[in-house]
Image (cartoon, grey):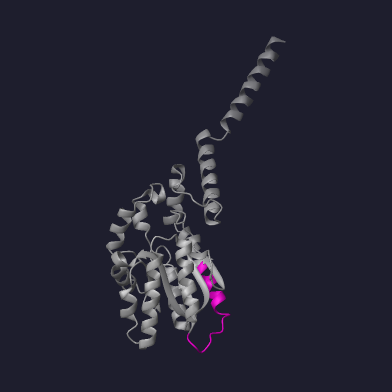
Amino acid sequence: MRGVREVVVIVFLAICSMANAIKPCPRATVVRDEVSYCLSWRMSVEANNMAGWRTVPMQCLPYIQGYMIGGQYDRDMAFIADQILSYVKGIVLSDDGMDAWILDVDDTCISNLFYYKGKRFGCDPYDPKGFKAWALKGGCPAISAVLGLFDKLVESGFKVILLTGRDEETLGQVTVDNLHNQGFIGYERLILRGIISRLEIEQSGTLTQPFKSHAMLMALRRAEHKGQGAIQYKSGIRKQLVEEGYRIWGNVGDQWSDLQGDYKGNRAFKLPNPMYFVP
């Protein structure tokens, strides 16, 4: 009887040992939980359910880094560009040359990924001086999917208007040069914040004198937008464009503040950006 009891105990211990052996590693469970949380966090950010966030959670640094440089970000951008082009194919342009598209600039046309890599992909707080120093280098590479979209829009006859929150006084010329060097050639206008837009007036050399005066008036009115939030600023610019007679068929940006507000256009397309939030 004693021998049977010992056998039962040994079998029981062996079963317990096997059960413990197949349990998941606690660390692996933690990693899976973090990835799951960070995926949910990014989806909430992209859906604008976390308005006003300031930095990427530190535990999500590996996930956001992997998303931005591991290929999924590029695939998402290409997918959205394809969806936009499918919509474009169904648009019949008028003969008056006033069919327009609006594109944001930073992390829509050109990328600041190299800069944000040094800021731990958004885990560090926004650094306005650091970003200005980066932008002044004029080395932002084109986002290939959006450059392809831009070319298709221009080829199709749309007036592409680049609308950015960058300051014209300090970043105007370097932004023009950066865009040109990256292949963004043939847009209707580049509109920046702040002082009277010398660049726009210079670029309108082929326009008639009355329109030059109107462009100057619009530039003067834009000076009033300095210090406004992005939604108010960009809504005001779109209002001015509609008053000029433009029909805004589409609006593309990486921030919800690029797309919200008044005079949004027929369609708005949000590009992914989990690294920062512009109110």
User: Residue 200 location in percent, x, y?
Assistant: 34, 77
User: Residue 270 location in percent, x, y?
Assistant: 51, 64
Q: Residue at x 46, y 48 (%)?
A: 63
Farthest residue, direction top: 2
Q: Is residue 257 magenta?
A: no
Q: Is residue 85 magenta?
A: yes
Q: Is residue 169 above or below residue 56?
A: below
Q: Quadrant of residue 4?
A: top right
Q: Is residue 168 toward the left or the right of residue 247 in the image?
A: left
Q: Is residue 50 toward the left or the right of residue 2 in the image?
A: left
Q: Nearer the viewer, residue 207 or 118?
A: 207
Q: Nearer the viewer, residue 74 or 263?
A: 263
Q: Is residue 210 above or below residue 16?
A: below
Q: Quadrant of residue 162?
A: bottom left
Q: Is residue 80 visible?
A: yes
Q: Residue at x 53, y 33 (%)?
A: 26
Q: Residue at x 46, y 59 (%)?
A: 73
Q: Quadrant of residue 115?
A: bottom left
Q: Is residue 5 above or below residue 33?
A: above
Total labels: the figure holds 0
Looking at the rendered image, the quarter that the N terminus falls into is: top right
User: Residue 241 location in percent, x, y?
Assistant: 47, 76
Instruction: Give the residues in magenta.
Output: 80-97
Q: Nearer the viewer, residue 37 or 12?
A: 37
User: Residue 110 location in percent, x, y?
Assistant: 38, 66
Q: Nearer the viewer, residue 57 or 52?
A: 52
Q: Residue at x 53, y 87 (%)?
A: 94
Q: Is residue 186 visible?
A: no
